[in-house]
Amino acid sequence: MDARAIIAAVRDGAGLNAAQAQWFAQGLASGAVSDAQAGAFAMAVLLRGIGPAGRVALTQAMRDSGQVLTWDLPGPVVDKHSTGGIGDSVSLLLAPALAACGAYVPMISGRGLGHTGGTLDKMEAIPGYSALPDASRLRAVVAEVGCAIVGATGEIAPADRRLYGIRDISGTVESIDLITASILSKKLAAGLEVLALDVKCGSGAFMKTAEDALALARALVDTANGAGCRTVALVTDMSQPLGHCAGNTLEVIEVLETLTGSRVSEALWDVTTALGGEALALAGLAPDVAAGSDMIDEALETGRAAETFGRMVTALGGPADFVERFPDRLPAAPVLRPVPCPRAGYVAAIDAEALGHAVVRLGGGRLVGTDRINPSVGLADLAAIGQDCASGEPLALVHAATEADAEAAVAAVLAAYRLDDTAPPEPDLILERVA
Protein backbone atom coordinates (compact mmCIF):
# COMPACT_ATOMS: atom_id res chain seq x y z
CA MET A 1 0.00 0.00 0.00
CA ASP A 2 1.26 3.49 -0.78
CA ALA A 3 0.01 7.09 -0.84
CA ARG A 4 -0.32 7.27 -4.63
CA ALA A 5 -2.57 4.22 -4.79
CA ILE A 6 -4.81 5.49 -2.00
CA ILE A 7 -5.09 8.96 -3.58
CA ALA A 8 -5.89 7.43 -6.97
CA ALA A 9 -8.58 5.21 -5.45
CA VAL A 10 -10.30 8.17 -3.80
CA ARG A 11 -9.89 10.26 -6.96
CA ASP A 12 -11.54 7.53 -9.02
CA GLY A 13 -14.52 7.25 -6.68
CA ALA A 14 -13.59 3.97 -4.99
CA GLY A 15 -13.83 5.50 -1.51
CA LEU A 16 -11.59 4.75 1.47
CA ASN A 17 -11.56 1.53 3.47
CA ALA A 18 -10.34 1.08 7.05
CA ALA A 19 -6.91 -0.31 6.06
CA GLN A 20 -6.27 2.54 3.64
CA ALA A 21 -7.39 5.11 6.20
CA GLN A 22 -5.12 3.62 8.88
CA TRP A 23 -2.13 3.59 6.51
CA PHE A 24 -2.68 7.17 5.36
CA ALA A 25 -3.26 8.51 8.88
CA GLN A 26 -0.10 6.86 10.15
CA GLY A 27 1.76 8.30 7.15
CA LEU A 28 0.49 11.79 7.96
CA ALA A 29 1.62 11.41 11.56
CA SER A 30 5.04 9.97 10.72
CA GLY A 31 5.83 12.20 7.74
CA ALA A 32 5.84 9.30 5.27
CA VAL A 33 3.06 11.14 3.42
CA SER A 34 4.39 14.35 1.87
CA ASP A 35 2.60 17.72 1.98
CA ALA A 36 1.90 17.40 -1.75
CA GLN A 37 0.34 13.97 -1.25
CA ALA A 38 -1.70 15.19 1.71
CA GLY A 39 -3.02 18.09 -0.36
CA ALA A 40 -3.86 15.78 -3.27
CA PHE A 41 -5.68 13.42 -0.90
CA ALA A 42 -7.68 16.29 0.59
CA MET A 43 -8.66 17.54 -2.86
CA ALA A 44 -9.68 14.05 -3.98
CA VAL A 45 -11.86 13.66 -0.88
CA LEU A 46 -13.41 17.09 -1.47
CA LEU A 47 -14.24 16.36 -5.10
CA ARG A 48 -15.28 12.68 -4.93
CA GLY A 49 -16.21 12.01 -1.30
CA ILE A 50 -15.56 8.85 0.72
CA GLY A 51 -19.09 8.03 1.96
CA PRO A 52 -20.29 7.29 5.51
CA ALA A 53 -18.10 4.19 5.95
CA GLY A 54 -15.01 6.03 4.70
CA ARG A 55 -15.83 8.94 6.99
CA VAL A 56 -15.94 6.65 10.03
CA ALA A 57 -12.75 4.89 8.94
CA LEU A 58 -10.85 8.18 8.50
CA THR A 59 -12.15 9.55 11.81
CA GLN A 60 -11.07 6.47 13.75
CA ALA A 61 -7.74 6.24 11.93
CA MET A 62 -6.85 9.85 12.74
CA ARG A 63 -8.01 9.38 16.33
CA ASP A 64 -5.75 6.35 16.66
CA SER A 65 -2.74 8.11 15.09
CA GLY A 66 -1.78 9.34 18.57
CA GLN A 67 -2.67 9.06 22.22
CA VAL A 68 -6.31 8.46 23.19
CA LEU A 69 -7.00 9.93 26.63
CA THR A 70 -8.88 8.14 29.38
CA TRP A 71 -10.23 9.89 32.49
CA ASP A 72 -10.95 9.04 36.11
CA LEU A 73 -12.91 12.07 37.29
CA PRO A 74 -15.90 12.60 39.62
CA GLY A 75 -18.06 14.03 36.81
CA PRO A 76 -18.79 13.55 33.11
CA VAL A 77 -16.25 14.55 30.46
CA VAL A 78 -18.00 16.98 28.12
CA ASP A 79 -17.03 19.24 25.23
CA LYS A 80 -18.43 21.54 22.56
CA HIS A 81 -17.26 22.27 19.05
CA SER A 82 -18.20 24.86 16.44
CA THR A 83 -17.72 24.30 12.72
CA GLY A 84 -16.43 27.84 12.42
CA GLY A 85 -17.72 31.32 11.80
CA ILE A 86 -17.03 35.00 12.34
CA GLY A 87 -17.08 36.56 15.78
CA ASP A 88 -17.85 33.16 17.29
CA SER A 89 -16.19 33.02 20.71
CA VAL A 90 -18.81 30.81 22.39
CA SER A 91 -16.19 28.21 23.35
CA LEU A 92 -14.46 30.70 25.67
CA LEU A 93 -17.74 31.31 27.48
CA LEU A 94 -19.07 27.77 27.49
CA ALA A 95 -16.03 25.80 28.71
CA PRO A 96 -15.81 27.59 32.09
CA ALA A 97 -19.61 27.70 32.42
CA LEU A 98 -19.86 23.92 31.95
CA ALA A 99 -17.04 23.39 34.43
CA ALA A 100 -18.83 25.60 36.95
CA CYS A 101 -21.84 23.27 36.57
CA GLY A 102 -19.91 20.09 37.39
CA ALA A 103 -18.68 18.96 33.98
CA TYR A 104 -15.04 18.36 33.08
CA VAL A 105 -14.08 19.97 29.77
CA PRO A 106 -10.85 19.06 27.95
CA MET A 107 -11.57 21.38 25.01
CA ILE A 108 -9.19 20.36 22.21
CA SER A 109 -9.44 23.28 19.80
CA GLY A 110 -8.06 24.35 16.44
CA ARG A 111 -6.53 27.40 14.84
CA GLY A 112 -8.23 29.61 12.28
CA LEU A 113 -9.27 27.92 9.04
CA GLY A 114 -9.78 29.97 5.90
CA HIS A 115 -11.88 33.02 6.76
CA THR A 116 -12.97 31.74 10.19
CA GLY A 117 -11.33 32.49 13.52
CA GLY A 118 -9.71 29.81 15.65
CA THR A 119 -10.31 29.25 19.36
CA LEU A 120 -6.64 28.44 19.87
CA ASP A 121 -5.50 31.69 18.23
CA LYS A 122 -7.84 33.62 20.54
CA MET A 123 -6.46 31.98 23.66
CA GLU A 124 -2.88 32.60 22.51
CA ALA A 125 -3.66 36.33 22.45
CA ILE A 126 -3.46 36.09 26.26
CA PRO A 127 0.18 36.73 27.30
CA GLY A 128 1.90 33.67 28.71
CA TYR A 129 -0.99 31.30 28.01
CA SER A 130 0.31 27.83 27.13
CA ALA A 131 -2.12 26.49 24.54
CA LEU A 132 -0.18 23.31 23.79
CA PRO A 133 0.44 21.53 27.10
CA ASP A 134 1.43 17.90 27.14
CA ALA A 135 -1.14 15.29 28.09
CA SER A 136 -0.08 15.11 31.74
CA ARG A 137 -0.47 18.85 32.24
CA LEU A 138 -3.81 18.80 30.42
CA ARG A 139 -5.03 16.10 32.80
CA ALA A 140 -3.87 18.07 35.82
CA VAL A 141 -5.52 21.33 34.76
CA VAL A 142 -8.82 19.66 33.86
CA ALA A 143 -8.87 17.82 37.20
CA GLU A 144 -7.98 20.96 39.18
CA VAL A 145 -9.94 23.69 37.35
CA GLY A 146 -12.61 21.72 35.49
CA CYS A 147 -11.69 22.92 31.99
CA ALA A 148 -8.75 23.57 29.70
CA ILE A 149 -8.95 25.18 26.27
CA VAL A 150 -5.91 23.83 24.42
CA GLY A 151 -4.69 22.61 21.07
CA ALA A 152 -3.96 19.11 19.94
CA THR A 153 -0.29 18.49 20.67
CA GLY A 154 1.77 15.95 18.77
CA GLU A 155 0.44 13.35 21.19
CA ILE A 156 -3.24 13.82 20.28
CA ALA A 157 -4.49 13.11 16.75
CA PRO A 158 -1.21 14.08 15.04
CA ALA A 159 -2.60 13.03 11.65
CA ASP A 160 -5.37 15.59 11.97
CA ARG A 161 -2.97 18.28 13.13
CA ARG A 162 -1.02 17.80 9.91
CA LEU A 163 -4.02 17.56 7.58
CA TYR A 164 -5.79 20.50 9.29
CA GLY A 165 -3.03 22.93 8.31
CA ILE A 166 -2.86 21.58 4.76
CA ARG A 167 -6.63 21.97 4.29
CA ASP A 168 -6.37 25.62 5.30
CA ILE A 169 -3.96 26.46 2.47
CA SER A 170 -5.12 24.03 -0.22
CA GLY A 171 -8.73 25.10 -0.75
CA THR A 172 -10.22 21.96 0.81
CA VAL A 173 -11.72 23.30 4.03
CA GLU A 174 -15.37 22.78 2.99
CA SER A 175 -15.42 18.98 2.60
CA ILE A 176 -18.01 17.38 4.91
CA ASP A 177 -15.92 14.20 5.06
CA LEU A 178 -12.77 16.06 6.09
CA ILE A 179 -14.58 18.38 8.51
CA THR A 180 -16.23 15.41 10.21
CA ALA A 181 -13.02 13.41 10.53
CA SER A 182 -11.04 16.44 11.70
CA ILE A 183 -13.48 17.49 14.40
CA LEU A 184 -14.27 14.06 15.73
CA SER A 185 -10.76 12.57 15.64
CA LYS A 186 -9.61 15.23 18.13
CA LYS A 187 -12.77 15.01 20.22
CA LEU A 188 -12.77 11.22 20.40
CA ALA A 189 -9.06 11.23 21.23
CA ALA A 190 -9.87 13.49 24.19
CA GLY A 191 -11.91 10.69 25.74
CA LEU A 192 -15.27 12.49 25.70
CA GLU A 193 -18.52 11.08 27.00
CA VAL A 194 -20.71 13.92 25.66
CA LEU A 195 -20.28 16.35 22.77
CA ALA A 196 -22.43 19.35 21.82
CA LEU A 197 -21.89 20.58 18.26
CA ASP A 198 -22.58 24.04 16.87
CA VAL A 199 -22.95 23.72 13.10
CA LYS A 200 -22.92 27.17 11.51
CA CYS A 201 -25.07 28.10 8.52
CA GLY A 202 -24.99 31.25 6.41
CA SER A 203 -22.69 33.72 4.68
CA GLY A 204 -19.93 33.45 7.30
CA ALA A 205 -19.99 29.65 7.57
CA PHE A 206 -18.42 26.94 5.45
CA MET A 207 -21.96 25.62 5.00
CA LYS A 208 -23.86 28.40 3.26
CA THR A 209 -27.25 26.68 3.04
CA ALA A 210 -29.50 25.01 5.58
CA GLU A 211 -29.40 21.82 3.50
CA ASP A 212 -25.59 21.62 3.64
CA ALA A 213 -25.49 22.51 7.34
CA LEU A 214 -28.02 19.80 8.16
CA ALA A 215 -26.04 17.27 6.14
CA LEU A 216 -22.90 18.11 8.11
CA ALA A 217 -24.76 18.04 11.42
CA ARG A 218 -26.17 14.60 10.65
CA ALA A 219 -22.76 13.31 9.52
CA LEU A 220 -21.15 14.53 12.73
CA VAL A 221 -23.88 13.23 15.03
CA ASP A 222 -24.14 9.83 13.33
CA THR A 223 -20.38 9.32 13.26
CA ALA A 224 -19.83 10.40 16.87
CA ASN A 225 -22.75 8.41 18.28
CA GLY A 226 -21.57 5.41 16.28
CA ALA A 227 -18.19 5.74 17.96
CA GLY A 228 -19.77 5.73 21.42
CA CYS A 229 -19.86 9.45 22.22
CA ARG A 230 -23.31 10.85 23.05
CA THR A 231 -23.68 13.79 20.70
CA VAL A 232 -26.21 16.47 19.79
CA ALA A 233 -25.92 19.28 17.23
CA LEU A 234 -27.57 22.66 16.89
CA VAL A 235 -27.56 24.37 13.51
CA THR A 236 -27.10 28.07 14.25
CA ASP A 237 -27.15 31.24 12.20
CA MET A 238 -23.99 32.69 10.68
CA SER A 239 -25.59 35.13 8.23
CA GLN A 240 -23.72 37.78 10.23
CA PRO A 241 -20.97 37.78 12.86
CA LEU A 242 -22.24 36.18 16.06
CA GLY A 243 -20.59 38.73 18.32
CA HIS A 244 -19.80 42.38 17.76
CA CYS A 245 -16.08 41.75 17.17
CA ALA A 246 -13.91 39.69 14.81
CA GLY A 247 -10.23 39.30 15.64
CA ASN A 248 -8.38 37.45 18.36
CA THR A 249 -7.77 40.05 21.07
CA LEU A 250 -11.03 41.84 20.32
CA GLU A 251 -13.02 38.63 20.74
CA VAL A 252 -11.26 37.82 24.02
CA ILE A 253 -12.22 41.28 25.27
CA GLU A 254 -15.84 40.69 24.24
CA VAL A 255 -15.84 37.37 26.11
CA LEU A 256 -14.41 38.92 29.27
CA GLU A 257 -16.89 41.79 29.11
CA THR A 258 -19.68 39.21 28.88
CA LEU A 259 -18.25 37.02 31.66
CA THR A 260 -17.85 40.00 34.00
CA GLY A 261 -21.14 41.63 33.01
CA SER A 262 -19.59 44.94 31.99
CA ARG A 263 -20.96 44.70 28.44
CA VAL A 264 -22.91 41.56 27.57
CA SER A 265 -23.13 40.23 24.01
CA GLU A 266 -26.67 38.84 23.92
CA ALA A 267 -26.18 36.59 20.89
CA LEU A 268 -23.04 35.01 22.36
CA TRP A 269 -24.87 34.50 25.66
CA ASP A 270 -27.93 32.94 24.01
CA VAL A 271 -25.98 30.43 21.90
CA THR A 272 -23.83 29.58 24.94
CA THR A 273 -26.86 28.79 27.11
CA ALA A 274 -28.54 26.79 24.31
CA LEU A 275 -25.50 24.58 23.73
CA GLY A 276 -24.73 24.34 27.43
CA GLY A 277 -28.26 23.22 28.22
CA GLU A 278 -28.00 20.45 25.63
CA ALA A 279 -24.63 19.31 26.98
CA LEU A 280 -25.68 19.28 30.64
CA ALA A 281 -28.88 17.36 29.89
CA LEU A 282 -27.06 14.80 27.74
CA ALA A 283 -24.42 14.38 30.48
CA GLY A 284 -27.03 13.79 33.18
CA LEU A 285 -26.12 16.96 35.09
CA ALA A 286 -29.51 18.52 34.37
CA PRO A 287 -32.96 16.86 34.16
CA ASP A 288 -33.69 18.44 30.79
CA VAL A 289 -32.38 21.00 28.31
CA ALA A 290 -34.32 23.93 29.79
CA ALA A 291 -32.95 23.24 33.27
CA GLY A 292 -29.46 22.90 31.83
CA SER A 293 -29.75 26.27 30.10
CA ASP A 294 -30.85 27.81 33.40
CA MET A 295 -27.76 26.35 35.08
CA ILE A 296 -25.50 27.93 32.43
CA ASP A 297 -27.33 31.26 32.89
CA GLU A 298 -26.70 31.10 36.62
CA ALA A 299 -22.99 30.27 36.17
CA LEU A 300 -22.58 33.29 33.90
CA GLU A 301 -24.71 35.70 35.94
CA THR A 302 -23.07 34.93 39.30
CA GLY A 303 -19.50 35.22 38.02
CA ARG A 304 -18.69 31.57 38.69
CA ALA A 305 -17.84 31.06 35.00
CA ALA A 306 -15.58 34.14 35.05
CA GLU A 307 -13.79 32.84 38.14
CA THR A 308 -13.27 29.44 36.48
CA PHE A 309 -11.96 31.12 33.31
CA GLY A 310 -9.44 33.08 35.38
CA ARG A 311 -8.22 29.96 37.17
CA MET A 312 -7.81 28.17 33.82
CA VAL A 313 -5.76 31.06 32.41
CA THR A 314 -3.52 31.10 35.49
CA ALA A 315 -3.09 27.31 35.50
CA LEU A 316 -1.90 27.45 31.89
CA GLY A 317 0.64 30.23 32.41
CA GLY A 318 -1.41 33.39 31.86
CA PRO A 319 -1.66 36.39 34.22
CA ALA A 320 -3.13 35.65 37.65
CA ASP A 321 -5.14 38.88 37.50
CA PHE A 322 -6.33 38.45 33.91
CA VAL A 323 -10.08 38.59 34.60
CA GLU A 324 -9.69 41.73 36.70
CA ARG A 325 -7.24 43.52 34.39
CA PHE A 326 -7.80 42.04 30.93
CA PRO A 327 -7.83 45.42 29.10
CA ASP A 328 -4.28 46.08 30.34
CA ARG A 329 -3.03 42.56 29.65
CA LEU A 330 -3.94 42.25 25.96
CA PRO A 331 -2.09 43.71 22.95
CA ALA A 332 -3.63 46.73 21.21
CA ALA A 333 -3.40 47.74 17.54
CA PRO A 334 -1.75 51.12 16.84
CA VAL A 335 -4.23 52.25 14.15
CA LEU A 336 -7.99 52.64 14.69
CA ARG A 337 -10.21 53.65 11.79
CA PRO A 338 -14.02 53.89 11.77
CA VAL A 339 -15.94 52.63 8.73
CA PRO A 340 -18.49 55.35 7.89
CA CYS A 341 -21.91 54.25 6.70
CA PRO A 342 -22.22 55.52 3.09
CA ARG A 343 -25.90 56.46 3.47
CA ALA A 344 -28.78 56.28 5.90
CA GLY A 345 -30.58 52.95 5.99
CA TYR A 346 -31.04 49.60 7.66
CA VAL A 347 -28.41 46.88 7.50
CA ALA A 348 -30.17 44.40 5.23
CA ALA A 349 -27.44 41.78 4.68
CA ILE A 350 -23.82 41.12 5.56
CA ASP A 351 -21.23 39.10 3.69
CA ALA A 352 -19.72 37.66 6.86
CA GLU A 353 -17.17 35.62 4.94
CA ALA A 354 -15.83 38.84 3.41
CA LEU A 355 -15.44 40.28 6.91
CA GLY A 356 -13.48 37.17 7.89
CA HIS A 357 -11.18 37.60 4.91
CA ALA A 358 -10.70 41.25 5.86
CA VAL A 359 -9.49 40.16 9.31
CA VAL A 360 -7.11 37.65 7.70
CA ARG A 361 -5.67 40.36 5.42
CA LEU A 362 -5.20 42.64 8.43
CA GLY A 363 -2.92 39.94 9.84
CA GLY A 364 -5.45 38.29 12.14
CA GLY A 365 -5.37 34.98 10.23
CA ARG A 366 -3.15 32.98 7.91
CA LEU A 367 -2.86 33.12 4.13
CA VAL A 368 -0.15 30.42 4.21
CA GLY A 369 0.71 27.98 6.96
CA THR A 370 3.88 29.82 8.01
CA ASP A 371 2.15 33.18 8.55
CA ARG A 372 2.38 34.63 12.06
CA ILE A 373 -0.82 36.08 13.46
CA ASN A 374 -1.04 39.61 14.82
CA PRO A 375 -3.50 39.10 17.71
CA SER A 376 -4.32 42.80 18.11
CA VAL A 377 -5.93 43.44 14.71
CA GLY A 378 -9.53 42.96 13.65
CA LEU A 379 -12.95 44.56 13.48
CA ALA A 380 -14.94 45.85 16.46
CA ASP A 381 -18.42 47.28 17.03
CA LEU A 382 -19.79 45.55 13.92
CA ALA A 383 -23.28 46.73 12.96
CA ALA A 384 -25.86 43.93 12.96
CA ILE A 385 -28.61 43.02 10.52
CA GLY A 386 -31.61 45.26 11.13
CA GLN A 387 -29.58 48.08 12.66
CA ASP A 388 -30.76 51.57 11.64
CA CYS A 389 -27.66 53.53 10.60
CA ALA A 390 -27.34 57.22 9.88
CA SER A 391 -25.10 58.46 7.10
CA GLY A 392 -21.53 58.63 8.39
CA GLU A 393 -22.30 56.52 11.47
CA PRO A 394 -19.66 53.77 11.95
CA LEU A 395 -20.53 50.33 10.60
CA ALA A 396 -17.42 49.00 12.35
CA LEU A 397 -14.14 50.09 13.89
CA VAL A 398 -11.00 48.74 12.19
CA HIS A 399 -8.01 47.83 14.40
CA ALA A 400 -4.94 47.67 12.15
CA ALA A 401 -1.16 47.55 12.23
CA THR A 402 -0.70 50.21 9.53
CA GLU A 403 -2.67 52.99 7.86
CA ALA A 404 -2.55 51.13 4.54
CA ASP A 405 -3.99 47.99 6.15
CA ALA A 406 -6.72 50.07 7.77
CA GLU A 407 -7.66 51.72 4.48
CA ALA A 408 -7.96 48.35 2.73
CA ALA A 409 -10.08 46.96 5.58
CA VAL A 410 -12.43 49.95 5.47
CA ALA A 411 -13.07 49.26 1.77
CA ALA A 412 -13.64 45.56 2.46
CA VAL A 413 -16.14 46.24 5.24
CA LEU A 414 -18.08 48.72 3.10
CA ALA A 415 -18.29 46.12 0.33
CA ALA A 416 -19.56 43.49 2.79
CA TYR A 417 -22.58 45.50 3.99
CA ARG A 418 -25.83 45.97 2.08
CA LEU A 419 -28.23 48.72 3.17
CA ASP A 420 -31.94 49.06 2.50
CA ASP A 421 -34.66 51.59 3.25
CA THR A 422 -36.80 49.04 5.11
CA ALA A 423 -35.88 46.97 8.13
CA PRO A 424 -35.32 43.26 7.41
CA PRO A 425 -36.55 40.49 9.73
CA GLU A 426 -34.11 39.56 12.49
CA PRO A 427 -32.45 36.19 11.74
CA ASP A 428 -33.22 33.31 14.11
CA LEU A 429 -30.19 32.22 16.12
CA ILE A 430 -31.08 28.53 16.46
CA LEU A 431 -32.24 26.97 13.19
CA GLU A 432 -32.34 23.21 13.77
CA ARG A 433 -31.57 20.50 16.32
CA VAL A 434 -30.08 17.14 15.34
CA ALA A 435 -29.77 14.29 17.83
Image: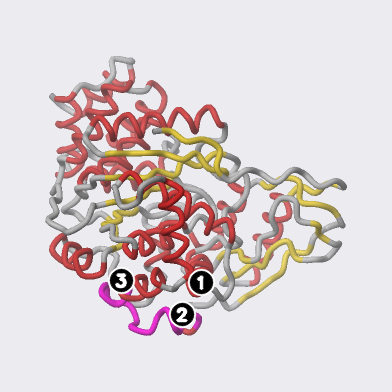
Q: Is residue 306 magenta?
A: no
Q: Between marks 2 and 1, how big is the CA–CA gap? A: 7 Å
351 on left or right of 78:
right
Q: Between marks 3 and 1, how big is the CA–CA gap? A: 16 Å
Name the image quarter holding residue 400: bottom right
- Say which residue label 2 marks: 326
- What main secondary structure does the magenta stretch of the protein show? helix
Assess disc 3: are there few (<14), some (14-19) or many (≥20) residues with their C-alpha within 10 Å of its C-alpha.
many
**Amino acid type at image mark 2:** Phe
Q: Where are the magenta residues, as a range?
A: 312-327
Quarter of the C terminus within the rendering = top left
Q: Which numbered dot is residue 59?
A: none
- Say which residue label 1 marks: 253
Tag 1 or tag 2, which sits nearer the N-term? 1
At 51% from the left and 49% from the top, the residue drawn is 85
30 over 128 or under it: above or below:
above
At 16% from the left and 67% from the top, the residue drawn is 140
Element under label 2?
Answer: helix
Asked if the residue under mark 1 is in contact with the one under mark 2, i.e. CB atoms within 8 Å, the reply is yes
For discs 2 and 3, the disc positioned in front in the rendered view: 3
Asked whether 308 or 9 is in front, the reply is 308
- Say which residue label 3 marks: 312
Q: Is residue 175 visible?
A: no
**Amino acid type at image mark 3:** Met
Element under label 1?
Answer: helix
Asked if the residue under mark 3 is in contact with the one under mark 2, i.e. CB atoms within 8 Å, the reply is no
- Name the spot of residue 413 as percent of width and height, x first: 68, 56
317 over 201 or under it: above or below:
below
**Amino acid type at image mark 1:** Ile
